[in-house]
Image: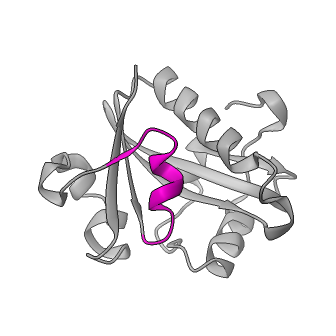
């Protein structure tokens, strides 16, 4: 678990509450999936969270959300940077995400839009990709060095 720079592992209930309040998928999250989630603020009442679902050398960036009061402070960018570092530590080479609202934000962070057919089988089989996110969601990818 990474705890540097004020980041820690959030509690499942707190993440579910934040995601629900921001209309993001949360129904597939479990205590086990929290192993690769990071947050700012307290574990029980985070100001921002982000997660990673790892499938070998591929991973799915999950659920970046920052409370309204903490937006425009760089918290989101710091969370993305931290999760990318964690992904590298875990041996991830390709990071994917699905978004309906933040395509421009992630494009500025080095992600590029890709066709759904170009996504690895392991990511396509994930619950978020296969059933939780709408087919209209943008699919983005970033190669990690």
Q: Position of residue 1 (x, y in %)?
A: 67, 32
Q: Is residue 87 visible?
A: yes
Q: Is residue 120 left or right of residue 142?
A: left
Above or below, comparing residue 34 to residue 138 in the picture: above
Q: Nearer the viewer, residue 144 or 41?
A: 144
| Residue sitting at x 48%, y 57% | 104
| Residue 74 image-quadrant placement | top right
Q: Nearer the viewer, residue 100 or 17?
A: 100
Q: Position of residue 29 (x, y in %)?
A: 52, 64
Q: Is residue 32 visible?
A: no
| Residue 11 image-quadrant placement | bottom right
Quarter of the image for the C terminus: give it: top left
Asked whether residue 106 is drawn in magenta, I would say yes
Q: Is residue 17 left or right of residue 114?
A: right
Asked whether residue 108 is drawn in magenta, I would say yes
| Residue sitting at x 83%, y 59% | 70
Q: Nearer the viewer, residue 53 or 105?
A: 105
Above or below, comparing residue 84 to residue 10 in the picture: above
| Residue sitting at x 77%, y 31% | 3
Q: Is residue 28 left or right of residue 141?
A: right
Name the outermost residue toward the left.
117
Q: Position of residue 43 (x, y in %)?
A: 81, 53
Range drawn in magenta = 100-112
How is this picture coloured? one colour
């Amino acid at each position: 678990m990474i705890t540097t720079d004020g980041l820690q592992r959030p509690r499942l209930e707190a993440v579910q509450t934040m995601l629900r309040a921001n209309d993001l998928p949360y129904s597939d999250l479990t205590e086990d999936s929290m192993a690769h989630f990071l947050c700012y603020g307290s574990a029980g009442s985070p100001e921002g969270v982000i997660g990673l679902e790892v499938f070998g050398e591929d991973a799915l960036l999950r659920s970046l959300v920052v409370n309204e009061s903490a937006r425009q402070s760089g918290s989101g960018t710091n969370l993305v940077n931290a999760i990318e570092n964690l992904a590298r530590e875990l041996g991830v080479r390709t990071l994917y995400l699905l978004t309906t609202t933040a395509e421009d934000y992630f494009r500025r962070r080095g992600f590029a839009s890709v066709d759904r057919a170009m996504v690895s089988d392991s990511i396509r089989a994930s619950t978020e990709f296969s059933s939780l996110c709408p087919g209209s969601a943008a699919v983005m990818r970033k190669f990690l060095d």
